[in-house]
Amino acid sequence: MTELKTQVLSILGGRLRDILGGLSAEDWRRAEEIRLRRGGPLTLVCGGTDVFVDSGGRECEQGAAYQVTPEDIMRTLQLLSQSSVYALEEELRRGYVTAPGGHRVGLAGRVVLEGGAIRTMKSISGLNVRLARQVTGAADPILPFILQGGGPHHVLLASRPRGGKTTVLRDLVRQLSDGVPRLKCRGRRVVVVDERSEIAACRDGEPQLAVGCRTDVLDACPKAEGIVMALRGLSPDIIATDEIGRPEDAAAIAEVLNAGVKVLATAHADRRSDLFKRPVLKELLAEGTFGRVVFLGQRGSLESVYDGEGRPLFVRCRAWTAAGRG
Amino acid sequence: MTAFIGAACIIFAGARLGAIAADALSRRLRQLGALQSGLEALRTEIRFSATPLPAALARAAVAAGGEIGAMFRAWGRNLGGASALSPAEALAAALLQRPAPLNLKDEDLAPLRDLSGYLGASDQADQERHLQTAVKHLSDRAAEAAALQLRHGKLYRYLGVLAAVAIVIICL
C-alpha cells in the first residue's frame, strides 16, 4: 500500500500531494480512482461510489470538498510529462498517460482534430488517475479449467466493463509465463500484445506490473499487427491480448491457430448470448476457436466456464433472494 | 628604487584591470555562442527524439559546455525528480544558484526567460518555433556583443595601461 501511495503521490502536483498524503491507509486501500476536475471537488472513487475529500484529507460532503485548481491540474500534468508535453503526443492522441507503477491517468480537455482524426488534446481540464493494482492469484480459480495436458486451451475471458478481465488476464499471463508447478504446467513463452498499455502497463517500454519471466510485451501495438509481429519474430507459445472484436483481430487469431500458438483474449460481455451479438466473436465461437470461455463477475470473481462447444463446465450458484426473483 | 617598484605595480594593475574589462566582453560573446549551441541541441532533442526536458537539458549542457553548460545542467536538475517546478521556475532557480559565473547581461538572458515560459508546454512543432525565435534573438545579441567587443576590446586594454601611466606621472 505504501508503495502505491508513494507512486501516486509522486505524480500529483500543487496542494494535492499534501491533501491526499493525509488520507488514511484504509482510504488508500479502498480507492480505485482519483478524479481531478478543474474547479470541481476532489473525489475518490471507492467501490464505484464517489467520496469527496476536504483540504485536510478527510472524507466530507460535496460542498466542503477541496476545489481542484487549475494550478493543481497544471502541476500534475507537469509531473506526469516531466514538463515535456511534446513527448506525450501519442498519449494525448490516445487520451491517457501511463504513470510509473502502471497507474493510468485519463485526460479530459479540448480535442484537436486534423483530417477527421485526433491530432492532440489541449486545455486539459480534468485528470482521472486509475490506480493499478496487481492482484496476485487473481487467475487461481480459472487455471484448473483452462489447463489440459500441462498447457492452456485458447481462452476468452469475458465480463462487463470494469469486471476485472485485464487483472485476471495479467495474472494468467504471469502464472503461465513463470509456470504453475502445482498444476504441472511448465513456464511458457508469452507475448502480450498490449494495444492500450493496460496489461503490462509499460512506461518507456518497461512493464510496470509483473507479467512473468518469459513474457515479451509489444506495447501500444495494434492487436492485429502485433499478433502477426509476435508470430514472426518472437516465437511465442502463447499470445495474450485485450478486448478483441474487430474483423482484423479475427483474421490475426486465425493466423495464430494455424501456427499452433495458444491465444488468451478478453471481450466485453455479461453473458454468453452477448458474445453472439458481436459478429466477429460470434464467428470465432461458432467455429469453436476458444476451448474455454470464462465469464467473470464482480472484481474478477469466476462466474462460469464453457468449453468450445458451449457446454458449461462450471456455473456459480446465485443466492435466491427476493431481489433476485424480481 | 621604491618609487620605481610602485610605478611598476600601478602600471601592472592598470593593465590587468583593462584586460579584465576586455575579457569580460569576449567571455560574454563566447557565452552567447554557447547559449545558442545549447538551444540548438535542445531543439534537436525535442524535434527528433522527443526527449523529456530534464534529459534534453542535460544533453544541451554537454553541447554548450563551460559556464553555460553548468547553467543548463542545473536547469535540468531543478526540473527533474518530484519538485514539480515549471521550466520557468527551474530556470530562475538555476540562475539564482549560479553554478558558474556568467558574463551575460540581463537582456542577454531575456530570450531564454521568454522561452522558458513556453518550453515543454506544447507540441513539437510549436516548441521548435519558440526555440528558433530564442536562437534568433540570441544571435542578434551575439552580433551586438561582437561589435562591442571589436570596438571596445582593445580600447579597454590601452585605457588600463594609459590610466596607470597617467597616475604614475601625477604621483611623480
Image (spheres, rainbow, N blue to C red):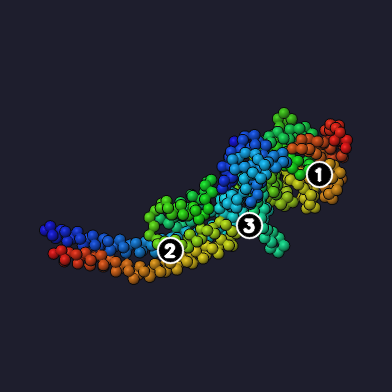
- Seen from the viewer's position, the closer of residues B85 and A255 is B85
Q: Residue at x 44, y 61 (%)?
A: B109
User: Which residue matches tag 1?
Assistant: A269
Left or right: A91 as drawn, with respect to B109: right
The quadrant of the picture occupied by the C terminus of chain A is top right
Looking at the rendered structure, the secondary structure element under dot 3 is strand
B90 above or below A102?
below
Do marks 1 and 3 share a subunit?
Answer: yes
Crowd band around label 2 with a 10 angstrom C-alpha radius: few (<14), some (14–19), many (20+): few
The quadrant of the picture occupied by the N terminus of chain A is top right
Left or right: A30 as drawn, with respect to A302: left
Q: Residue at x 36, y 63 (%)?
A: B26
Cα distance between the residues tagged 3 and 2: 31 Å
In the rendered image, the residue lying farthest to the top is: A182
- Seen from the viewer's position, the closer of residues B96 and B119 is B96
Which chain letter matches label 1? A
Answer with the quarter of the image where residue B162 lies. bottom left
Looking at the rendered structure, the secondary structure element under dot 2 is helix
* Badge count: 3
Q: Residue at x 60, y 40 (%)?
A: A57
Q: Which mark is residue A123?
A: 3
Q: Amino acid at mark 1?
A: Ala
Question: Looking at the picture, how far across and down is residue B140, in whole percent?
Answer: 45, 68
Q: Which mark is residue B109?
A: none
Crowd band around label 3 with a 10 angstrom C-alpha radius: few (<14), some (14–19), many (20+): few
